[in-house]
């Protein structure tokens, strides 16, 4: 007999392994997302033509989908857990349990299950029932068992036999089950867990408490009615979809500074991530990345906001070392670069302590409530905002909690009165408007005054390296990264 529920579970498992939402699968098959949902819920079955399409799409046979034979088991199962899940469990028993669930769960669902198991808030077990019928003889309107144990409150006609059922429940922890039993029960566990927990990333759930609508200022709530549409919505109806793992607020890249032209695909992105970078920015007796990490390690923030993060080349060195529960919010204008960030840090730079959320938004007008962030960080991010640099700097202060910290590097001139700085400022001024020049170049005293006027109680500064010697000629020497002649300071500003 055909088991609709089992067929639905197998279709869902194959879809998740292919990285498809119900909507995406529906579009490939030319049906509605509701039809796919009904198949997976066991309410309806695909017709024979749809079974044929499903078999072709997932490289299966129709029998494999209907019967769940060895072909289905081999192609849909996985031998290794995702790194983010593996890192949570040193013990083989729970890894074995999760591997059995991995056949039927997406990586996000599997990570959510693993995290709750590791925190002790989730337990998987099998309930076994034992029922025994006990015979007795009625005497004097009372019931006695054959061993004469008195049964209170039981009445019957004298001299007649009475049967009393005795029942016991036994709970067996799922991690103790054998391989065959796990394989048989895993689809039922996976379906129940999916209905109970949903597939929303834990980071999105956490960040929903911090977000507000950029149009009206009202609180944004996470809405995930089905797995095909996750979005944030306010009470006035403004909504922002989660697309490719990024919350998209409709921002556009700065003209002339298009990530989408510089990085046409994920392979271009990987080359950028693996490039050693400009040696100028790695100067200093102690590199800026190490000075920043020492500050993070000391303060141990629970919520970090990376302003105008780009490819996140600053914070990525810290993300490898954070060993406390932490939410990292990456913000940038470019949806494309954040989409690649999300993939890279989920696949190649996994840290089980860190939840990452990406917001494609205007960093001068963040969709974040006042005074709710522990730490704002920037690795050249403020300066990359060009004409909006100071707006972004003030916005970072707005979202910080009182007592919170902004940790960032800033380009600083040595001394406006020195010949070296005067020469550099003259050459810098010869560049045309296409370079989006900053109106003001600050020395460290001027910058400390800016911090005070912005609303920071105190600012600690550390020089990483100084200003370069000016060239002898009258031609500005750099075509790109035009601020590299300036010195660099690492600043820690407390609100």
Image (cartoon, helix red, strand yellow):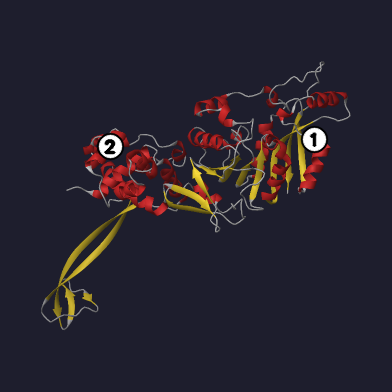
On the image, the x and y values in percent for residue 388 come to 71, 40
Q: Which mark is residue 440?
A: 1
How far across and how far down the image is residue 186, in percent?
31, 46
Residue for badge 2: 53
Q: Is residue 279 above or below residue 147?
A: above
How many numbered marks are there?
Answer: 2
| Residue 70 location (% of width, % of height) | 24, 36
Q: Is residue 472 above or below residue 394?
A: above
**Residue 485 higher or lower than 223, as above or below:** above
In this rendering, is residue 393 above or below 160? above
Q: Earlier in the sequence, mark 2 or mark 1?
A: 2
> Which residue is located at x 62 percent, y 44 percent?
304
- Towards the viewer: 105 or 249: 249
Nearest the viewer among 348 and 378 is 378
**Horizontal side of residue 269 vs 139, given as left or right:** right
The x, y position of residue 89, in whole percent, is 44, 41
Density class for disc 2 (Cα within 10 Å; few <14, some 14-19, many ≥20) is some
């Amino acid at each position: 007999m055909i088991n609709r529920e089992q067929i639905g579970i197998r279709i869902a498992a194959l879809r998740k392994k292919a990285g498809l939402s119900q909507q995406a699968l529906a579009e490939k098959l030319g049906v509605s997302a509701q039809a796919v949902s009904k198949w997976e819920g066991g309410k309806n079955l695909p017709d024979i033509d749809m079974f044929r399409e499903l078999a072709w799409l997932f490289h299966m046979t129709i029998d494999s989908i209907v019967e769940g034979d060895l072909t289905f088991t081999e192609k849909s199962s996985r031998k290794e857990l995702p790194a983010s899940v593996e890192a949570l469990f040193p013990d083989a028993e729970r890894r074995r349990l999760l591997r059995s669930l991995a056949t039927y769960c997406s990586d996000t669902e599997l990570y959510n299950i693993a995290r709750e198991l590791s925190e002790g808030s989730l337990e998987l077990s099998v309930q076994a029932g034992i029922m025994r019928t006990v015979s007795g003889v009625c005497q004097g309107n009372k019931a006695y068992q054959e061993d004469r144990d008195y049964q209170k409150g039981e009445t019957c006609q004298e001299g007649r036999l009475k049967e009393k059922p005795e029942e016991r429940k036994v709970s067996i922890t799922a991690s103790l089950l054998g391989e065959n039993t796990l394989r048989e029960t895993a689809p039922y566990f996976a379906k129940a867990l999916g209905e109970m927990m949903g597939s929303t990333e834990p980071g999105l759930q956490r960040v929903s408490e911090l977000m507000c609508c950029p149009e009206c200022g009202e609180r944004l709530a996470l809405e995930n009615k089905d797995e095909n549409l996750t979005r944030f919505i306010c009470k006035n109806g403004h909504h922002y979809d989660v697309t490719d793992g990024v919350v998209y607020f409709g921002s556009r890249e700065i003209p002339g500074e298009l990530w989408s032209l510089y990085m046409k695909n994920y392979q271009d992105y990987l080359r950028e991530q693996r490039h050693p970078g400009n040696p100028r920015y790695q100067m200093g007796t102690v590199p800026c990345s190490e000075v920043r990490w020492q500050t993070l390690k000391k303060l141990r923030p629970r919520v970090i906001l990376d302003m105008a993060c780009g490819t996140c080349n600053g914070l990525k060195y810290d993300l490898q070392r954070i060993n406390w529960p932490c939410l990292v919010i990456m913000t940038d204008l470019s949806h494309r670069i954040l989409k690649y960030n999300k993939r890279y840090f989920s696949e190649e730079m996994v840290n089980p302590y860190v939840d990452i959320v990406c917001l494609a938004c205007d960093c001068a007008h963040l969709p974040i409530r006042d005074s709710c962030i522990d730490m704002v960080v920037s690795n050249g991010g403020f300066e990359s905002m060009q004409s909006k640099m100071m707006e972004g700097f003030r916005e970072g202060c707005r979202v910080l909690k009182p007592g919170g910290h902004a940790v960032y590097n800033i380009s600083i001139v040595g001394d406006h009165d020195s010949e070296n700085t005067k020469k550099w400022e003259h050459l810098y001024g010869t560049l045309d408007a296409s370079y989006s020049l900053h109106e003001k170049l600050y020395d460290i005293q001027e910058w400390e005054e800016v911090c005070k006027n912005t609303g920071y109680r105190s600012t600690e500064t550390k020089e990483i390296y100084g200003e370069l010697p000016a060239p002898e000629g009258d031609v500005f020497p750099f075509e790109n990264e035009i601020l590299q002649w300036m010195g660099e300071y690492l600043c820690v500003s407390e609100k």
